[in-house]
Amino acid sequence: MATPRNDIPHLSASYETCRRMQRRHDPTFYCATRRLPAERRPTVHALYGFVRGADEIVDGDRGPTTPAQKRAALDRWQGELERGLAAGATDHPVLAALVDAGTRHALPLAQLSVYMDSMRVDCGPVRIGDEAELDRYMNGSAATVGRIMAPILGAPADAERFAALGVAFQLTNFIRDVREDLEMDRQYLPGWDEDARDAVARQVARARDLFATTADLHDEMPRGIRGGMRLARAVYERVLDRVESCEFEVTGRRSALPRWQMVAAAGGSLIPVRAR
C-alpha cells in the first residue's frame, strides 16, 4: 500500500485534516494507528474522517437537530463521497483523502452506503424489533467497516472475519451501554421490553460465539498491532464476564469496567465501530 501523493496541496491538506480529527477525537485509536506501517496510516486516517463526519451529523452538539435535518445532512455527506468516487477525485477538505485512498487501493467503499443506512436509523428514536433488524443495523455500523479495514491492515482474505469481529465489538458496546442508549431513546436489543435479562443473555452468547470464531485473527496481522488486538479482545470479553456475573442486569453500574480499560480496548481493536 503506497503512501499518498504529497504534490497536490488540497489532497495533502485533506489527509492532514483527517489525521488531526482522529488524534483529537479518538486519541487511543490514533495511537493504535501509529503502530501500523507508515504507508497504511493515511488510509486509516481518511476512513476515520468519513466515519467521524457522519457521527458528528448524528450526535454532534453543533450539527442539525431534527431527525429530518440529520438525514438530509447524511444524504449530502454520502452524495459528496459518491460523486468524488465516480469522478476519481474531489476537492472536499475531508473526503478528498478517502476518495484518493479508495481509488488508488481499490477499497470496497461502495459498501459505505450500508454504513450510512445504519446512521440514518440513529437519527430518531431507535427500536430494534428482531434479530434480522439488528443484523441489518450491525452489518452497516460494524461489519462494513471491518470489511474495509481488512485490506487496509493487510488481510484482504479475512474480510468476513474482520466483519464478524466488528460485530462482536459492536454487540458488546450495545450490552455495556444499554442505560446510556435508553437515555438517548435508543433500544438496540431485540426483546428488551418483554424480558430484558433474556435479551441481554442472548446477545452475550452471540458475542462470545463471534469472539470464538475470530480468536486467531490477530496472529495474522502486522506484528506491531497484534498486542493491541489481543488487548481489545480480552477487555471486551471481560465486559461479557462482568455482565454474566451480574446475572445480565445491565442498567446499573456493576457491569461497567473502568473507562481507561474500555478506551484502551477500543483503540486496540482498530475497527472504528460506533460506541455510544
Image (cartoon, rainbow, N blue to C red):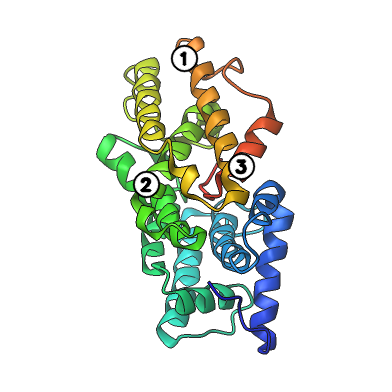
The mark tally for this picture is 3
Contact flag, marks 1 and 2 (Cβ < 8 Å): no
Q: Counting other residues with Cα less than 10 Å from the Cα at mark 2, is it few (<14), some (14-19), or many (20 or more)? A: many
Q: Earlier in the sequence, mark 1 or mark 2?
A: 2
Please name the amino acid that badge 1 sits on: Glu
Residue shown at 48% from the left, 64% from the top: 74
Disc 1 versus disc 3: nearer the observer? 3
Percent coordinates x, y for residue 124 in the rendering:
45, 47
Q: Is residue 50 left or right of residue 18?
A: left
Identify the mark at residue 161; answer none if there is no mark.
2
Q: Secondary structure at mark 3?
A: helix
x and y, in percent, of residue 149 in the image? 47, 57
Residue at x 29%, y 42% (from the top left corner):
133
Q: Position of residue 262 (x, y in %)?
A: 63, 33
The tag on residue 228 is: 3
Q: Of label 2 and label 3, which has the lower sequence position?
A: 2
Above or below, comparing residue 109 to residue 13 in the picture? above
Q: Callout 3, which amino acid?
A: Gly
Q: Amino acid at mark 2?
A: Arg
Other-residue count near label 1 (Cα within 10 Å), few / some / many at <14 / 14–19 / ≥20: some
Image height of 80 relative to 222, above or below:
below
Q: Considering the image in quadrants, where does the C terminus appear?
A: top right
Disc 1 to disc 2, C-alpha distance: 25 Å
Q: Looking at the image, is mark 1 or mark 3 earlier in the sequence?
A: 3
Look at mark 1 in the image and give the residue it sits on: 244
